[in-house]
Image: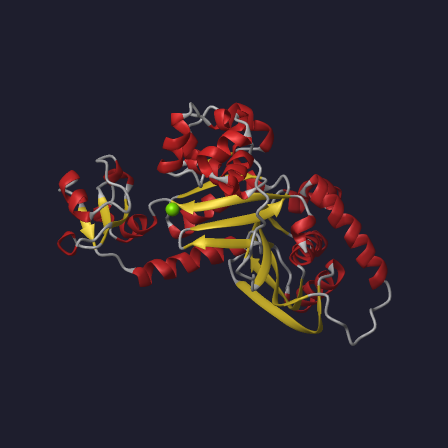
Amino acid sequence: MAEAQARDIILCDLDAFFASVEQRDHPEYRGRPVIVGGSASSRGVVSTCSYEARRFGVHSAMPMARAVKLCPGAIFLPGNMKLYRAVSEQVMALYERFTPDIEAVSIDEAYLAVPRGEGLKTAAKIRRAVRDELELPLTAGVSTNKLLAKIACGMAKPDGLDSLWPEEVPQKLWPLPLKVLPGIGPVSAEKLHRVGIKTVGDLAATPESVLVQQLGQAAAAECRQHARGIDSRPLEPVRQAKSFSEEQTFATDVAGPEALKAVLMEQAEELGYRLRAAGMRARTVGLKLRFADYTTITRDVTLAEATDRDSEIYRVTVQLFERCGGEGPWRLAGSRVSNLETSRQLTIFAPPPGAVKEDKLGEVRDRLRNKYGTEVLFRARRLAGSEAGHRKPGR
Ligand SMILES: [Mg+2]
């Protein structure tokens, strides 16, 4: 589905994850070295340690006995995998608000794909959301493939955000030591050092035949590709979004129903786009409204047939708005689609009049949007009321 589209890849990696969860839940641990892992007496190893502990030379996979020697004043914890898994689930659920294309690679690391041009902006929003809602530090690296996103993430750690675009490879990647490339371990690095290859740039400039002698055929080819920033591995999503939502809190309460409907139109377009990009259709469409007195209502409707059309989503949210939107003014409006199913199913109903034309138009718009980014196309239709608002993609 989306593989053919140009996308940005974000690697999201929680910093010192287990230790950060412990420091979050136990304020008395904050600012102190925290080491999570097996016990020294049973020859355990360090699973994760806080950045405070890393300053003493402690790192993960180190024998715990050695960590105790290096940092005797640390807080040593056996860890609570059940808790860490639950927090990881919360983090992944938060990512789903931003994109359905997520490949979780470990309990604290995931690749996300977003439309080309939106990587940095989305990564910044994700970092803020993880910080505000889950109180955890997250580092994100952005590029157009997994390899460069991973390296960018490494450069940004801890608690940072960086990008490494393919055109920046000679200037930013080549001066770095070999070890920044995933896949070059200490043994390979040592072999390459011996023949004078010290930086990624040296590696990129070395003829493949020389590398084959040092590393073997398969590894040599891969290393050369990586040194030039090339990585063709696709994102392999293992999670499917359960819903998409869009909501806006208005800087100034919106008073007129027409202004509010304009916001709903914008949200319907956004949700329709996200559904089509994910190859999904929604059977349930919902509306959320918050009034000036902070009363909040949510309502939804389940449709006879799932949809990915802007006009259908808009029709339903407006219907709900007219039924239970009251008089206003409104502080917040949100639209949500859920009950998702994979599209391209045979429909037992004939498409409604105009639907075929809209599908075609939608396709053209989606293509333009993938090419030029979110903001370009829809600006013209937004009214002052929604421009003043603060948009927040949500679950
Ligand atoms: Mg991590």
Vertical placement of residue 9 versus 349, above or below: above
Measuring from the top left, give residue 193's x and y in whole percent. Answer: 39, 27
Q: Is residue 251 visible?
A: no
Vertical placement of residue 391 versus 173, above or below: below
**Residue placed at 57% from the left, 53% from the top?**
99
Residues 301 and 256: in front is: 301
Measuring from the top left, give residue 136's x and y in whole percent. Answer: 37, 48
Measuring from the top left, give residue 224's x and y in whole percent. Answer: 53, 34
From the viewer's perspective, tell me whether residue 10 is left or right of residue 214. right
Vertical placement of residue 95 versus 216, above or below: below
Specify the quadrant that holds the C terminus: bottom right
Measuring from the top left, give residue 89's x and y in whole percent. Answer: 43, 60
From the viewer's perspective, tell me whether residue 199 is left or right of residue 303. left
Q: Quadrant of residue 304?
A: bottom right
Residues 291 and 118: in front is: 118
Specify the quadrant that holds the N terminus: bottom right
From the viewer's perspective, tell me whether residue 239 is left or right of residue 265. left
